[in-house]
Amino acid sequence: MHSYLARQPVLNRDKATVGYELLFRDGPNNCFPDVGDEHATNRLLADNFFTSGAIEATSGKKAFVNFPYTSLIQRTPLMFPKKSFVIEILETCDPSDELLEAVIELNSKGYTLALDDFVPSAEWKRFLPYIHIIKFDIRTVPIAKARFFIRHHKDKTNKILFLAEKVETHDEFTEACEAGFDLFQGFFFSKPELLQRKTLTPYALTTLRLYKEITLSDVDFGTIESIIATDVSLSYKLLRHVNNLTYTRAKPISSFKQALVYLGEERLRRFVTFVATAHATEKKPQSLYSLSLQRAHFCERLSNLARTDIIGNQAFLTGLFSLLDSLLDQPIEEVITLLPLDKQVQQALVHQTGPLGLILKLITAYDKAQWEAVSLLSKQLQINESDVAELYLESLKWSSYFEHTATD
């Protein structure tokens, strides 16, 4: 049986990832929320918290998990370590005396509780002393209205954190910050921070030069070595990372040339990809780095299943470069003209057309738990949905490793 799971990052005001909301689906023909809330929660917990899966799915950070009414009344969260997750009380819950008793007990035992998709009302007021996080869907409750509530409840005696959901642009992120929100959920971090043209930073130029070299059919080891040598931070990351990969060697690798020769051409391409991406995202949200690598692996693995003539390396680059505009704060149309990319890759990145474009659409839909779109695109690519779900979890595990190594 497959676990159908997507995740969405939760970031703080510094855009650092503090956790992930886990979004559940029960199989290829049963999209949540058609599945009962209780069943969805129980499956998610069983599939991801009775094993090491949750650690992989959240990269070791806290999981935000929806708990419906009955699960809370039955004290289901008590079966799991309190440090593992945040209990999200679904908006469909009845604010009854019975629920209040459960919330008070969970609070007293050290669990972190959040009100999901909160809409201010008198019925929930008595719950607030036991709540740690309040989540506002800014599509339902506008930021201006949420600001009024936050100002009346955010003081030294009340330690509630406020989370803005569905933040899709940096303007919304800035407005939410000014309104007093502490945490943010949405894909604003995966879009360019600045829409206007600006000069590429030294970091971005170094990264772009490395990307250009690894996309060539013949890798020039000397050119890559010279690029790396001009950047102290990148030099350190590369040597640190290659020695992590070769820790069994009696003598550490201490020169760039030695490291490049050891890796060989294909491994060098991947190696430079990992570390250059980490380098480019040094001043970006960690989620951007993780998502870039996850998409690269996910795209490559899906291309192996799709009944097309896609080359795996082209698919890998498509996934990786799908966030290149955000990495470099440049329009994607301009950035790709600086790289010798295959025409299919260019069309996928700019217009999301062609087989690679369909795969990229599928990946984006899965990231956002848009299950109907996932189902439709899987059919178009003639890929079994259970395989898509399995490869998604595999890509999380794969990218998590590099998130903990290449960024050290």
Image: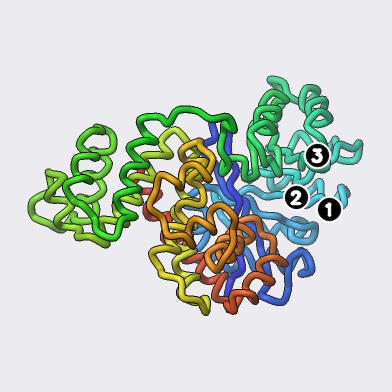
The front one of 76 and 404 is 404
How packed mark 1 is, by other alpha carbons closer than 10 Å (few <14, some 14-19, many 20 or more), is some
Give me the residue at 29% from left, 60% from top: 217
The residue positioned farthest toward the left in the image shown: 251
From the viewer's perspective, tell me whether residue 288 is left or right of residue 173: left
Disc 2 residue type (three-letter): Ile
How far apart in space, not on screen, are marks 2 and 1 (Cα)?
7 Å
The residue lying at 16 percent from left, 47 percent from top is 222
| Label 3 sits on residue | 127
| Residue 179 or residue 96, whichever sits in front | 179
Classify the position of the C terminus by image quarter: top left
Nearer the observer, disc 3 or disc 1?
Answer: 1
Q: Which residue is mark 2?
A: 89
Of callouts 3 and 1, the N-terminal one: 1
Give the residue at mark 1.
93
The quadrant the N terminus occupies is bottom right
Query: Which one is nearer the viewer's eye here, 387 or 120?
Result: 387
Q: Residue at x 47, y 40 (%)?
A: 327
The CA span between labels 3 and 2 is: 11 Å
Q: Earlier in the sequence, mark 3 or mark 2?
A: 2
Residue 156, given in percent of the width and then of the height, sits at 68, 20
Q: Residue 122: image x %, image y %?
A: 91, 36
